[in-house]
Image (tube, rainbow, N blue to C red):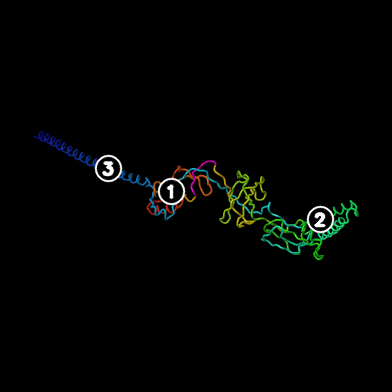
Amino acid sequence: MKTILSITGIALVMVVGMSYAGTLSTIENTTNHEHNGHDHEHSAKTNNSARKIAEHASSEDVEPEQKINLTAEKLELANIQVKTLQPRAFINKIYAPGELKANGYKSYLVSPRTDSVVIRRHASLGDHVEVGQKLVTLFSETMAQAQAEFLIASSNWHRSKKLGKQTVSESMLVESENIYKATRGKLIAYGLTPEAITKITSQDNATFGQYSLIAERDGVVLQDDFMQGQRVAAGETIMLLANENELWVEANIPPNKHLDLRVNSPAIIELDGAKYPAKVIQEAHTIDPVTRTRIVRLSVENKGHNLHSGMFVKVFFHFKTNDQVMAVSEEALIRDTDGDWTVFVESSQGEFEQVIVTLGESLGEYRQVFGLTAGTKIVNKGTFFVASEMAKGGFDPHNH
């Protein structure tokens, strides 16, 4: 009986164990299935989020086209000028500081040719004088002696001629003539004109020894460094006359800048916004020991007499580019916030887009550019207006 119960118990334990194991297996399978389901669901959600993030990032990386449409009315109102670019030769400007000088070929230094005393002046600084006009009256003991010698020689010569060869020997006649010519030549050497020499015979004794210096040419008195009563030495400059119709400009070029400046090379002189055409007439081949520059001399016509000796001016030498290049006006260029230079290109009628360009050398009011093809239409005037209109339309004109 006990044996039967034991067997029955064992069997029962085995049945219960098998049932429990089955139950555990079922529970484990169910748990694994649910866990795998959760994993698949989580993975799907993760992939979906990643796809959305990628799509969002991709949409941010792609910049919208920087374009704007402007009506014909706006273009006209803002005076927008569009220019078609074509390669061509440009004038390159090289700057140098300069100073206006009196034209040395058309100037005249007024100075006594013997030690003298200034009696009175007849012209002052800044006066315009004409040829033959009296400038200053001087007195000189040497001049008085020369005038006296001339009067004696003149009297002897005229008396000898009047007496003739029948009374005066040939040698005495020749001698008196030569003395007369010598004394007259001395007066001319002292600066007297033939008209002034003729008047010596009728000159009052009180004015004996006095003489006047006259203007040898038309011009302006640029210098008069003397006072009445002053004693001036022979050769000392008391006045400077200059013809200001044509002036010199001395431009200072750095010694390391090699320019092909030939005679008659064109240049522009600028003073207070006004421009005057000029041309090269001389070029120094030595370096100034003080300024350490090379001097290039130019000639400029002074129409209107707005230019005066001593003024400082800007000199721009003009050179043509060797090759045809693409260039835009400085006004057409605008920077973006990244520091890149850009222009506005008209892609179609009234539609503009901002394009980055690379700058080349400066060509005066123009700048060489790279990145644009021939025939491209750009905004040549009114760049800032187009940029502001693009900003108003929701675009950032600086590519942001």
Looking at the image, do the residues carrying marks 2 and 1 touch, with CB atoms under 8 Å apart?
A: no
In the rendered structure, the answer to whether residue 29 lies left or right of residue 392 reads left
Q: How far apart are the alpha carbons under marks 3 and 2? A: 125 Å
Q: Residue 51 lies in what quarter of the image?
A: top left
Residue type (three-letter) at the residue carrying disc 1? Phe
Position of residue 173 measured from the top left corner of the image (x, y, whole percent): 88, 53
Which residue: 16% across, 36% down?
18
> Considering only vertical position in the picture, is 130 above or below 60?
below
Assign the magenta stretch its main secondary structure: loop
Q: What is the secondary structure assignment of the residue under circle 3? A: helix
Position of residue 85 measured from the top left corner of the image (x, y, whole percent): 46, 45
Task: Looking at the image, tell me whether mark 2 or mark 1 is earlier in sequence order.
Answer: 2
Residue type (three-letter) at the residue carrying disc 3? Ala
Camera-side mark, 3 or 2: 2
Mark 2 — residue? Answer: 184
Q: How far apart are the alpha carbons under marks 2 and 1? A: 81 Å
Which residue: 73% across, 59% down?
214
Mark 3 — residue? Answer: 44
Q: What is the secondary structure assignment of the residue under circle 2? A: helix
For the record, the magenta segment spans 322-329
In the rendered structure, the answer to whether residue 240 lies left or right of residue 358 reads right
Q: The N terminus is located in which quarter?
A: top left
Position of residue 202 measured from the top left corner of the image (x, y, whole percent): 81, 63
